[in-house]
Image (cartoon, rainbow, N blue to C red):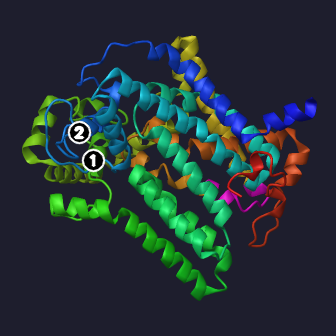
Amino acid sequence: MKTRAKRLLCSISVIVVVAFVVRMAVYYPFSLKKEVPIASDRLPYGSETGQVAAAIAEGRGFSSPLRMVRTGPTAWFAPIYPYLLAGIFMHFGVFSYLSNLIIHVFDLACSAFTCWPIAAMAARAFGKKTGIAAAWAWVFLPTAIFYPVVWVWDTSLAGLWMAILIAATLKLRGSDRWSWWLGYGALWSVGAMINPSLLSVLPFVALWALWPLRTQLGPALKLASAAGVIFVLGIAPWAIRNYVVFHQFIPLRSNFGLELWLGNNPSVPDSWTPWLHPNDNLDEALKYSRMTEIPYMAEKEREAWAFIRSHPIDTARSTLHRFANHWLGVWDAPADLWPTAPWYERGTIVSSCLFALLAWLGALFACRTRNVAAYPLGIVMLIFPLAFYLTHTSLRYRFPMDPIMQVLAAFAVVYMFSPAARRAAQAPTNDDFPSSGLPAEPETVVSVLS
């Protein structure tokens, strides 16, 4: 009986199912609200992404991300998630209760299924005990439950895909198999079409995966080139569409200028100005519609860079605020908020701070043990947030790296309290992936992605 229970607790299928049940249980009270929100309501259908999905479903094409005015063609988003929502709208009704329900169930499933690549990453890098611990911790992680329950966006899908990409990177390191590298390029092209922010870590983790083959430079370059060709072919249709529509080369998305300006303008109080967003500000929405998207974004980018150059101290202060918000999930210092915060806000502060602290401790312990997996996991921690420090931050924006943080946080706990797991994470200093961290039991979570 104990052996069977242990096998069940170590089964990735069981963990994923439990994660989905937990999320559905939390979502259930929300699902009982059957009144259909008006189309201008932001959250029930993903705000801008929902508006684009509605435009597609109604035959207006990939256009009009704002809720107050129709603005014509857009490249505000990469296409996969808006088209996914549009498909649901076309079959179950635009802004209908049933569509909203199906969208949320999909997001909940993505969040639950993220347990799989989390287990793969942790087990391959740090041993099977850490793989099991990381997957179970994700089941109950507050942000992994909160965002798919309350927010329609590509958040959960992007988190799942980032975890798959890093798990694939760990598996790929040092391989000379053409099929693996071609698949790797395809995975990254899909990631780019889900959320282009994932690409911020691509050059670094791909180089890490290729590094053991550096003594065979010719074959290594061929493998990298093949993966690169597949990647380019994967994003080419979207880039071609944008060039045909806007007569400019826009390979991924167009909204960087606006996001930069929202965090860097004279009205910024501490980190950004959400009330100036054209989805909430009628004057900006009308200006956006009048100028059309690309000139509007270009103007905002010019204004933002001009402000950054002319106000370096204000920019540095805002950047510091955004750094703190990214890691702690609060705008103000936790010590200032604590005396007046209600219990649930105090719980949020504690969990956010503890999660970030454990993730960084995990990265430190991985470096201390000279585990080569510390590099790709640490790269995500260091590189992925950089663009948000410059523009504006949210725990929702951070969510794609939360699975990597979960792996490191679980490793930190296991490392501190389990000498056996600490020994399993010890890695040689050569270029090969640490064999002691590889999965050994095909029936358990440690076999995934193997």
Q: Is residue 205 above or below residue 353?
A: below
The image position of residue 378, as x and y in percent, is: 62, 54
Determine the residue positioned at 61% across, 61% down.
169
- Is 209 on the left-hand or right-hand side of 372? left
Residue at 69 percent across and 50 percent down: it is 120
Q: Amino acid at mark 2?
A: Pro
The magenta stretch spans residue 11: no
Using the rendered view, name the quadrant where residue 69 is placed: top left
For this rendering, which residue is in front, 415 or 322? 415
Residue 221: percent from the left, percent from the top? 54, 82
Q: Name the outermost residue toward the left.
A: 290
Q: Secondary structure at mark 2?
A: loop
Residue 76, label in figure: 1
Q: Is residue 94 left or right of residue 5?
A: left
Residue designated by label 2:
65
Q: Residue at coordinates 54% horizontally, 18% vertically from top-left?
A: 345
Where residue 70 sits, quadrant-wise, is: top left
The vertical placement of 41 against 187, above or below, is above
What is the spatial separation of the Cα atoms under label 1 and label 2, in whole angstroms?
A: 8 Å
State if disc 2 and disc 1 touch (CB < 8 Å). yes
The N terminus lies in quadrant = top right
Query: Does the magenta portion include 374?
Result: yes
* Magenta span of residues: 367-378
39 relative position to 168: left or right = left
- SS of the residue at dot 1? loop
Mark found first going from the N terminus, 1 or 2: 2
